[in-house]
Image (cartoon, rainbow, N blue to C red):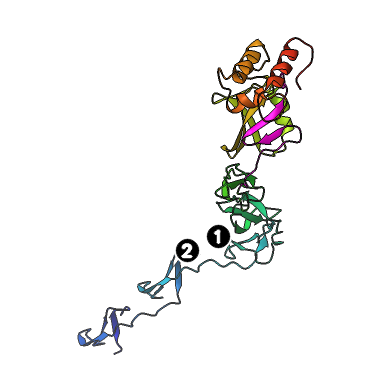
Amino acid sequence: GDWIIDSNATCTVKGSKHKECTACGAVIETDSIPAVGHTASDWIIDTDATCVDEGSKHKECTVCNLVLETEIIPSTGHSFTNYVSDENATCTDGTKTAVCDHGCGTKDTVIDIGSGQGHTLSDWIINTNATCVDEGSKHKECTVCNLVLETEIIPSTGHSFTNYVSDGNATLEADGTKTALCDHGCGAKDTVTDEGSKLEFNDITSDIYEVKDGFISGISIKTTVKELKESVNETGYVRVVKDGKVVEDNTALATGMKLQLVIGNKVVKEVTVVVTGDTNGDGNISVTDMISVKAHILKKSTLTDAYAKAGDTNGDGGISITDFIQIKAHILGKSSLE
C-alpha cells in the first residue's frame, strides 16, 4: 500500500514512514523522511541603532523560529544640517547651533564664519613712557571689545643736554668746565670742557686813585671798602684783606690793607692801600701820625713802604716839613687832607 507517516520530518530531524500489508497489517517496508532544513526569515530588528549606540538584528527559521544569524547594526552617528545663528557675533565671528537630525537632542555649535563685524583699531595707547635710558611700550586695541591687536616698543630717548652753565672753575692755566642737566628732567648731568673759558690776567686800575708800584693811593680817610671796590675797573672779584682776613664793605680803609683781585679763587693781583696821612694804619689822622712824620723828618725813625707813602701828603715823592704842616692843619681843623 502507500507510505504511512510514522513521524514527520522537521527542519533538523529526520522523520520515518512505512508500508504495511493491507490484508494482515504487517510492516512490509520502512524508510526515513529527510529533514526539511531551515527557512531563513528576513532580518528582524532586535534593537535599533542610535546616534551613539549600536543596535542588533537577527534572522530566524520561519518554521521553527531558531535564530540562524545575528548581526550588529552600527551606530548612525549624529547628523547636523540645520544650523541657526546664535546671534552672538561681535567684532569677531559668533557661533551657530544645530540639533541632531536624528532627533536625539544632541546639539552642535560651530563658528559662524563671516558673522563678525571686524575689529576697529584705536590710536597708539602708551603703556609705559620711554625714559632717557629705558624703553617704553605702546599698543593698539579694538575700540569696541578692547582686545589688544598690536604692540610696539618705544625706544629710549637718550639724554639731551643743551643748557650748559659754567662751573666757575676756570683758571689762568686752563679752561674750566660747564655742566648741564638733562632736558628731559631725569636729573642726569653732563660736564664738558668750557672751551675758551681760560682766564686772562687782569691788572688793577682805577680812574679815581693812583695804582702804581704795588700801591693804590690818593685815598682819603673814612673812605669805605665798598667805595674803594666800586672805584676800580676790574670785572673780576675784588676784595680787601687785613692780616689775611677779608674786611667787610662798610669798614673804613686803613693804610696797609691789601686790595686783591681774585679770579677763579686765585689771587692774581694785590696792591697795598695807602690812606693819605694815615701813617700808622689805624684808618685815622691823629697826633700819632704827625709825630711819626716829624720823627721821620728828624731821622729819629723811618717810615717805609705804604706808611712812608701815606706820610707824603703832598705827593712830591718825599716826606718834608710841608707834609708835617698839612697833617697838623688837618688835625687842628684848619684844612682837610683829600
Residue 160 appears at what percent x and percent y? 63, 52
The residue positioned 53% from the left and 66% from the top of the image is: 78
Which quadrant of the figure contains the C terminus? top right
**Which is more toward the observer, 264 or 142?**
264
Task: Determine whether, in the image, residue 164 is placed left or right of residue 35.
Answer: right
The residue singled out by tag 2 in the image is 52
Front residue of this view, candidates 168 and 188: 168
Q: Position of residue 87 (x, y in %)?
A: 70, 57
Q: Which residues are magenta?
A: 199-223
Where residue 238 sits: x, y (%)? 65, 33
- Vertical placement of 229 versus 17: above or below? above
The structure residue drawn at horizontal position 40% and vertical position 79%, both measured from the top left corner, is 40
Tell whether label 2 touches label 1 (CB within 8 Å).
Answer: yes
Secondary structure under badge 2? loop
Residue 160 lies left or right of residue 30; in this view the side is right
| Quarter of the picture holding the N terminus | bottom left
Residue under circle 1?
104
Which quadrant of the view contains residue 230?
top right
For image coordinates 67% across by 47% down, the residue present is: 163
The residue under label 1 is which amino acid type? Answer: Cys
